[in-house]
Image: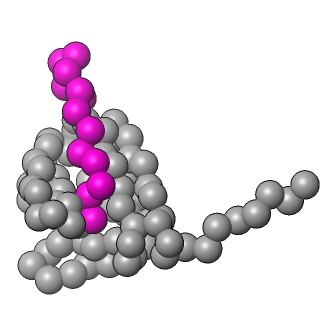
Amino acid sequence: MTQDQLDAIFKTYGAKSGADGWFVFPEGSVVSIYVAREGASVTLARVDGVKFEGDLLFGRTAKKELYAARIPDVLALSFDPGSSMPSRRAGF
């Protein structure tokens, strides 16, 4: 992915710029970031804050675990709104 793509995705998820350059998601929501390079992959799970520095993406969890990945190696993101967003009921 590119920085512009990630910015657009995080904006859609409701991420707000917080202290020290960290983007934080709405209360109770988390994102999983899928990263792969040369056949190896890893999932950065339950990330509640993201920071960009150059071509690096840093993710942190509520437990204060810190992850780092190259932005070009990010493949996909999965957003879990938790209880912060109302759920939609089936319309049928």
Q: Which residues are magenta?
A: 36-48
Quadrant of residue 10 in the image?
Answer: bottom left
What residue do we see at 30% from left, 55% from top?
Answer: 46
How many numbered markers are drawn? 0
Q: In the image, residue 68 lies at what x, y percent?
A: 10, 48
Q: Is residue 74 left or right of residue 31?
A: left
Q: Position of residue 11 (x, y in %)?
A: 41, 68
Q: Residue at x 12, y 50 (%)?
A: 67
Give the quadrant of residue 73. Answer: top left
Q: Give the residue displayed 14% in from the left and 42% down from the top.
A: 70
Q: Residue at x 15, y 63 (%)?
A: 63
**In this rendering, would 24 be left or right of 81?**
left
Above or below for 76 versus 57: above
Q: Is residue 29 above or below residue 58?
A: below
**Colouring style:** one colour
Residue sitting farthest toward the bottom: 19
Residue 13 visible (yes or no) = yes
* Location of the N terminus (image quadrant): top left
Against 27, is 4 above or below?
above
> Is residue 10 or residue 5 the one in the foreground?
10
* Residue 44 magenta: yes
Please state the horizontal and vertical placement of residue 37, each as a whole percent of the image.
19, 25
Residue furthest toward the top? 39
Quarter of the picture containing the C terminus is bottom right
Q: Is residue 92 left or right of residue 59?
A: right
Q: Quarter-wise, where is residue 6 in the image?
A: bottom left
Instruction: Indicate the position of residue 23 as horizontal and vertical percent values.
Output: 25, 71
